[in-house]
Amino acid sequence: MDVIRLLGIRDTPLSVDEVLAAVGDHAAGGTVFFVGTVREQDHGKQVTELSYSAHPSAEAELRQVAEKVAADFPVTALAAVHRVGDLELGEAAVVVAVAAPHRDEAFQAARRLIDDLKARVPIWKHQLFADGATEWVGAGE
């Protein structure tokens, strides 16, 4: 069975339960889970609106990131989904999970998965602040 169990760029709310179920594996001694949520402040300024957009190649790039993590670490399962569109404060923007035989491997692989996703997958965040300023943040931030 492929260790890459779930990948996606979605315009619908993300399900933590779906991601956790996707990486369930009896060979795993540790599962690390990360949920990135929309926060109310960034750079010390109040965020009033936030939207994510993705390049059409984003899902293919996400697969490449996941394949590299699966090749570099002894994982038994991994999953990663990222949201696009308008999000509310507190909503999940990204969910990743990695299962591995041991916790240290799972932590290392999960860290690489989220860091490489943020650095390489062409997804851009557009924030509007209470003071009227706007900001675009993208891959490689």
Image (spheres, grey):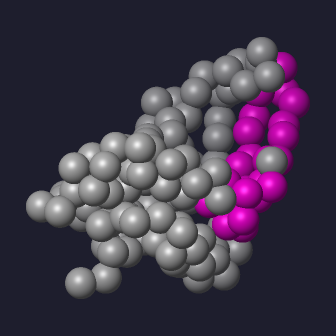
72 vs 81, nearest the viewer: 72
Q: Of all residues shown, which one is farthest toward the left?
A: 26
Vertical order, 83 against 59 (above or below): above
27 vs 1, nearest the viewer: 27
Image quadrant occupied by the N terminus: bottom left
Percent position (x, y) of residue 94?
Answer: 49, 50
Q: Residue at x 37, y 56 (%)?
A: 98
Q: Of all residues shown, which one is farthest toward the right?
A: 133
Percent position (x, y) of residue 21?
Answer: 19, 58
Q: Residue at x 42, y 51 (%)?
A: 105
Residue 101's image quarter? bottom left
Horizontally, residue 61 falls left or right of residue 108, namely right
Residue 138's image quarter? bottom right
Residue 135's image quarter? top right
Q: Inspect this view and state whether residue 16 appears.
A: no
Residue interval drawn in magenta = 117-140
Q: Residue at x 87, y 30 (%)?
A: 133
